[in-house]
């Protein structure tokens, strides 16, 4: 939780100076828990793919002989000649070593956080993380809404973002990236609410129970806190006016509804808490904006789609030239210095499609293990959801729904490139596939 809180409130981990402490904590966690020790069992396929991804990004930074570079990445030398005054005799695959080093740090940290959290969750701790995410979500959403209304484009009412663009939203420079965080956090919060309601639900007859006791049982503090956190996160998401964020949350809701039907109903109290939270969220949203403003924002999706198609067309030129090795993880902005042909006066810093950006930066060398890792994770996630017969199922389902929502949003955005979002996604993934524990109290 320390890594998640630090990266979230520390400008979402955008600036390298904010990543030093989380990197040290991840390294210490890896040393303490030794997630690479499997007790004589074979290394899971998912872990193999994650290790290959890290190794492939590291390989992009290795200086290779000129003849080898000219064979595996013929466009690499030309890119270096255009970007540098002096071209070394031994070239790395990456065309920007600094950005690739940062991407390697974030990727390695995310992988370590996932494998360590998965091991820890097998013996407990899921409830603590779910509460922590809810608390962080409540605080960061409150800060974002207040900042958006009063800070005049400053982050934390003091700092101006280094990059020009739309006003920041809370500690996130990009509003769409804040939406990614909420898509991951809100379903997890609601899943924990459902699990909490199911465990504490009275299954016997209620006729003989005094109404005061029933009222106290219904209005328990934890359910109220979870509802308030989810409500404020949803309000903040709507206030970002992020079309991709709203679409991603819609996808998460659809997956959550499917998982609910697949398992059956949760406790009845969950429905009433969700209904109350939805009403409160709608009321707060209408107090902040008007339906006409939201409708106008959604009506511009056609214009946005046209812009995305231009970006994707320029990106496909990179994919064509670097299809095997990519330009180096994290180097999309640098590659656009050479390949951008549309929208003069603006420099694209992201592909606005995470899958396409992975292929352009990593080629088959990174993209293939990423695709296999996603397939392995979905398989393991489905098995974990199918095996879990405890109340923890709803927490798993909430975490999986959030990840599915971000997968849908990633067709339009690249929110997982932010360290704060990567850390939360790693924790959510660990919650989904961790080994079944014996604790059921939530």
Image: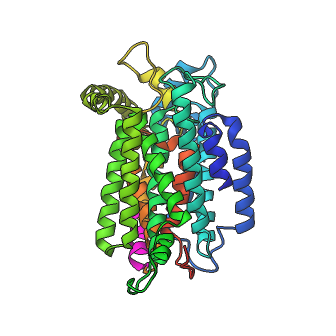
User: Would you identify the image quadrant in which residue 386 lies?
Assistant: bottom left
Q: Position of residue 225 (x, y in %)?
A: 54, 58
Residue at image position (44%, 73%) is: 393
At x 30%, y 57%, the residue is: 254
Quadrant location of the C terminus in the rendered image: bottom right
User: Residue at point 62% right, 58% down?
Assistant: 113
Residue 84 appears in the picture as rendered:
yes
Of residue 252 and residue 320, the one placed in the foreground of this image is 252
Q: Position of residue 296 (x, y in %)?
A: 28, 27
Of residues 343 and 427, the one drawn nearer to the viewer in this rendering = 427
Q: Quadrant of residue 237?
A: top left
Q: Is 306 positioned to the left or the right of 373 in the image? A: left
Q: Is residue 170 above or below residue 53?
A: above
Nearest the viewer among 16 and 237 is: 237
Compared with 327, 6 (above or below) is below
- Asked if the stretch drawn in magenta spans residue 387, the answer is yes
Q: Position of residue 3 (x, y in %)?
A: 66, 51
For this view, does 32 lie left or right of residue 106?
Answer: right
- Closer-to-camera residue (89/277): 277
Question: Is the magenta region chiefly helix, strand or loop?
Answer: helix
The answer to whether residue 413 is left or right of residue 2 is: left
Q: How many marks?
A: 0
Q: Is residue 258 left or right of residue 436?
A: left
The segment highlighted magenta reads 378-388
Q: State yes or no: residue 397 in magenta.
A: no
Q: Residue furthest top?
A: 345
Where residue 319 appears, x then y in whole percent?
A: 38, 36
């Amino acid at each position: 939780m320390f890594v998640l809180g630090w990266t979230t409130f520390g400008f979402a981990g955008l600036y390298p100076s904010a990543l030093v402490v989380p990197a040290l904590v991840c390294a210490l966690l890896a040393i303490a828990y030794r997630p690479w020790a499997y007790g004589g069992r074979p290394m899971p396929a998912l872990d193999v793919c994650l290790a290959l991804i890290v190794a492939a990004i590291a390989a992009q930074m290795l200086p290779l002989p000129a003849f080898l570079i000219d064979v595996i990445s013929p466009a690499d030398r030309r890119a270096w000649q255009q970007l540098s005054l002096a071209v070394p005799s031994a070239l790395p695959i990456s065309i920007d070593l600094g950005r690739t080093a940062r991407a390697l740090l974030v990727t390695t940290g995310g992988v370590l956080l996932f494998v360590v959290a998965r091991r820890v969750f097998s013996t407990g701790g899921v409830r603590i993380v779910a509460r922590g995410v809810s608390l962080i979500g409540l605080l960061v959403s409150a800060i974002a809404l207040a900042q958006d209304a009063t800070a005049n484009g400053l982050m934390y009412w003091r700092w101006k973002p280094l990059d020009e663009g739309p006003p920041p939203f809370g500690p996130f420079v990009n509003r769409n990236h804040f939406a990614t965080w909420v898509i991951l956090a809100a379903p997890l919060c609601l899943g924990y609410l459902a699990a909490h309601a199911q465990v504490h639900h009275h299954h016997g007859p209620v006729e003989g129970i005094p109404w005061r006791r029933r009222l106290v049982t219904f209005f328990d503090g934890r359910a109220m806190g979870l509802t308030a956190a989810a409500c404020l996160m949803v309000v903040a998401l709507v206030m970002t006016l992020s079309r991709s964020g709203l679409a991603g949350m819609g996808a998460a809701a659809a997956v959550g509804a499917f998982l609910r039907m697949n398992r059956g109903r949760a406790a009845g109290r969950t429905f009433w808490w969700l209904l109350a939270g939805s009403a409160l969220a709608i009321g707060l949203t209408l107090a902040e904006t008007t339906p006409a403003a939201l409708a106008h924002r959604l009506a511009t999706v056609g214009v946005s789609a046209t812009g995305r198609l231009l970006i994707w067309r320029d990106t496909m030129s990179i994919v064509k030239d670097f299809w095997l090795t990519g330009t180096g993880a994290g180097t999309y902005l640098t590659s656009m210095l050479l390949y951008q042909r549309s929208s003069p006066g603006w420099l694209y810093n992201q592909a606005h499609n995470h899958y396409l950006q992975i292929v352009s930066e990593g080629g088959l060398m990174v993209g293939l293990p990423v695709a296999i890792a996603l397939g392995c994770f979905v398989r393991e996630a489905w098995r974990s959801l199918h095996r879990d017969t405890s109340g923890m199922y709803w927490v798993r389902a909430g975490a999986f729904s959030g990840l599915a929502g971000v997968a849908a949003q990633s067709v339009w955005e690249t929110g997982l490139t932010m360290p704060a979002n990567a850390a939360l996604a790693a924790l959510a993934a660990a919650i989904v596939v961790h080994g079944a524990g014996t604790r059921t109290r939530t």
